[in-house]
Amino acid sequence: MMATVPVRIPTPLRSFVGGAAVAEVEATTLGGALRALVARHGALEKHLYSADGTLRNFVNVYVNDEDMRQLDGPATPLRAGDTVTIVPAIAGGSPGPSAAAPARPAAVGPAVGGDGEPRLTPDQLRRYSRHLLLPEIGVEGQKKLRAAKVLLVGAGGLGAPAALYLAAAGVGELGLVDFDVVEASNLQRQVLFSTADIGRPKLDAARDRLTGLNPDVVVRPFPHRLTGDNALEVLRPYDVVVDGTDNFPTRYLVNDASVLLGKPNVYGSIYRFEGQASVFDARRGPCYRCLYPEPPPPGLVPSCAEGGVLGVLPGLIGTLQAIETVKLLTGAGEPLYGRLLLFDALAMRFRELRLQKNPDCVLCGPHATQHGLIDYPAFCGVGAEPEAPAAGLPTISPTELAARLAADDPPFVLDVREPNEWEIGRIPGATLIPLGELPNRLTELTRAREVVVYCRTGGRSRRAVQLLLDLGFTRVENLEGGLHAWSDQVDPRIPKY
Amino acid sequence: MTDVELGAGLAEEVRRHGERAYPEEACGFLVGEAASASGTARRRIVRVESMENRVGDQRTRRFVIPPDEVRRFERSLEGSHELLVGFYHSHPDHPAVPSQFDQEHAWPWYTYLVLSVAHGRADELGAFELDPDERRFRPVECTVDAPPLPRE
């Protein structure tokens, strides 16, 4: 005897029956009622039945208040006045068996960690024995390092020690981003390179050195400038990003890409005798933009190429970055999240600042407005080429200047470098007024005479020329390429530094 | 696919439950604003309710919330502005992505949050929804209201 029975549909399935909470069907048995329901609403079938035609085991059906399993299952007869209710049971679980692991801090690296990784080889057991003795690392930690991928942005002062120690520590893959060649002036601090490497692409030299140190390590070179167009693709495969950049556009780019991809960014920076380090991870604390929402005006903060740096200093800061990276990958200890470590080599003092997540951060705050990468050179107010000449500023070439100095009415030559640079070498007849002192020493200049300004390579002198033009000087020129170009084109006895 | 918004502190509650239950799986209900539960681009989750993992064995890799519990809970919300909109569970020492088992047992429409707990510490939290046509999980965007600022 067919009965018309209401079937109560659970919320997740209502969209398949036109949004209704109840569907009426005619049936004699419970199984028949469900089949009739599916016949009318075909899209329901795969959610209620398995491929073999049996009811899925997490689909529970009640007749009135009785589970059909307590009744006769699908054969349960239905009568007028009965109500059928479909009720979800919720089940799930992890993939595969999971061994109970000892309580240890979280590792951000490969989430499955050492589990399921092949054993360490006898060679590896010998090589990493001092790590294996540490309970905080041990065999599991060493396997995590071997399974990990770390990207070093910049193979310079910071990247060099970080790369060496991470390779030595047995990190499985090191990506290196740098497009420079090794120069003599690098060797005072970039311990990854030797004298014989001068003139070689940095990444070629780095690969030889790192794989020589540890043949287990895969070194993946990216000999290109990191840009908004390629950064997400370059960073994506890596577990941790180590920021060893020397300019603001790339630093913001590395931060933003790390935040967007949800990766920790191990930050380090150096200048003269001072260094900083932190670990930025927007999921757990502030990001670089929380600390510095905007870059300083171009030129305000000199680079190490302009201001100098103690060669040992990046050795310390880059090594701190390597330590933090190993901790993140193995889960050992307390990472530098939300803390900025400041180091002063002259005072030989460490300080620590607490950093807070900036609630107004455009990138990682609750009301973030930036959801992708931007134009970083424009954001930082610099051209894509940091050394590109500023448009419109009058310039003079070294050979022109040499000719003018030999002629009548020679120009006043102004050197805006620091006194220690002046000691290294200078253009004969020049006057030294360091850039920082220039605004207070304008009386030493005369507006009547043409002024040619120079520095090491033309950056600081460009700012000095701009300053003088703004103050009403009319006959001011910048020496193109600075003292280095003078050495190349006019007088090779002047040392380049 | 419906993106979700997690109210302030709820992600922390899920993470803490995951850590408490470790090395077993934690599970619980996600309660949403009924008004935002269906047909909107964003579903707002206003409360989470932890549940006991009622699976008989293998609690380190399985969880079950039996239908009676689901029914009782849904009844408790009847007439309120709240609605059961999904479930969370943890993956001890496994990534915050649904397993094959999760997918086979999933319902459409609900939001599924999966928390990875690595060595006892909560790690990633992922949000997913079942694609009803393909019966495959798809990630959905999960916006988490900012946690309280860390104290000095």
Image (cartoon, coloured by chain):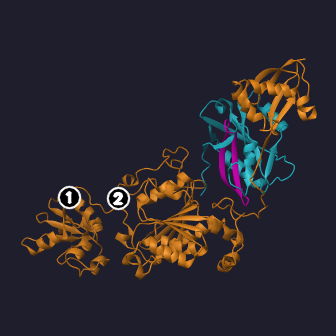
The number of discs equals: 2
Question: Does the stretch in magenta take in B120?
Answer: yes
Q: Nearer the viewer, residue A453 or A5?
A: A5
> Residue A205 lies in what quarter of the image?
bottom left
Q: Which chain is orange?
A: A
Q: Quadrant of the C terminus of chain B?
A: bottom right
Mark 2 or mark 1, which has the lower sequence index?
2
| Alpha carbon distance from label 2 to label 1 | 18 Å
Q: Which chain is cyan?
A: B
Kind of residue sitting beneath label 2: Pro
Residue mark closest to the camera, 2 vs 1: 2
Tell me the residue at 68%/42% (across/down): B136
Question: Does the stretch in magenta take in B115?
Answer: yes
Tell me the residue at 35%/61% (across/down): A300
Dominant SS in magenta: strand
- The location of residue B92, given as percent across then percent down, is 74, 55
Q: Is residue B119 left or right of residue A5?
A: left
- Report crowding for label 1: few under 14, some 14 to 19, many 20 or more residues within 10 A (C-alpha): some
Residue labelled with disc 2: A298
Q: Nearer the viewer, residue B42 or A224?
A: A224
Q: Is residue A422 above or below residue A43?
A: below
